[in-house]
Image (tube, rainbow, N blue to C red):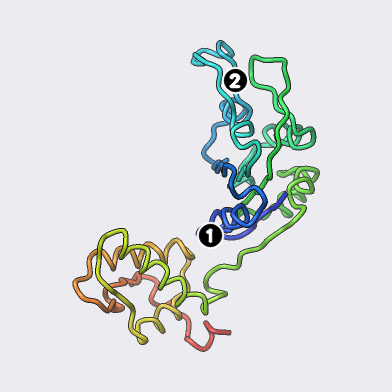
Amino acid sequence: DVLILGENGTGKELVARALHRQSPRANEVFISVDMGAIAETLFESELFGHMKGAFTDARENRPGRFELASGGTLFLDEIGNLSLAMQAKLLSVLETRRVTRLGSNAARNIDIRLICATNMPLYEMVDDYRFRQDLLYRINTVELYIPPLRERMSDIPLLAKHFINLFTRKYNKGSMGIGSDTMRKLQSYPWPGNIRQLENHIKKALVLADKALLSAEDLDLPSDEATAILPLAEAKE
């Protein structure tokens, strides 16, 4: 099992998908679940499935995400948002590798590779009794930390080129690029929203620009954060 830690927007799901593509399960399914978006009342039904009639709106038998991911990879994003009760139910399934649908007494075997991710401080949450220590040890056999973009400014040219290529194809634009002066400005900006923010700025600039070379004005860095711009030398440390 793999645990990916990092701020919002650092590309945790991209890393999870890359791990899946490089694994023996690459040709199997990759199921992504945003744990922060699942209400506690729907937690068991969404993850473990239900049988027809198990509750009012259960009109048919339905497998949960664990069953759907069996044979492949299950990615549980924002796992730090789970309540202690939900954590206990998840731990039980991870320990037995068996799920029981709501309304059923039959346990079903599952074969998944589990990857979890969060932007929350799980170790501090364990100390504060907000996250189960036994669950943390179950999911962090391999632990990866993704630094924020401000700590890896040298990645920006490669990321910018990737996003330009991606969006020029998507929006049928011609050849486009970023000038060296503009690239230096990109590398001196702290990017509080990390890779996701960089992607959004480039996407917007590319869609609206009417010239082949994107300028700093096209990229529209937030003026209210102008004072947060780092000196280029500091950004490259």
Q: Quickly name the residue at label 2.
A: 50
Q: Quadrant of the C terminus?
A: bottom right
State which quadrant residue 91 falls in.
top right
Tell me what residue is drawn at x 66 percent, y 63 percent: 145
What kind of residue is marked 1?
Answer: Gly
Residue 173: image location, x then y, percent:
25, 66
Label 1 crowd bin: few (<14), some (14–19), many (20+), radius 10 Å: some
Disc 2 crowd rating (10 Å Cα; few below 14, some 14-19, many 20+) is many
Mark 2: secondary structure:
strand
Q: Nearer the viewer, residue 134 or 211?
A: 211
- Horizontal arrangement in the rendering, residue 193 relative to residue 33 (left or right): left
Of the image marks 1 and 2, the number of the one nearer the N terminus: 1
Q: Answer left or right for 146 relative to 204.
A: right
Q: Which disc number belongs to residue 11?
A: 1
- For this orientation, the residue located farthest to the top is 53
- Foreground residue among 211 and 165: 165
Q: Left or right: 59 with respect to 119?
A: left
Q: Position of residue 48 (x, y in %)?
A: 63, 28
* Picture disc at residue 21: none
Up the image or down, 61 lies above or below 232; here it is: above
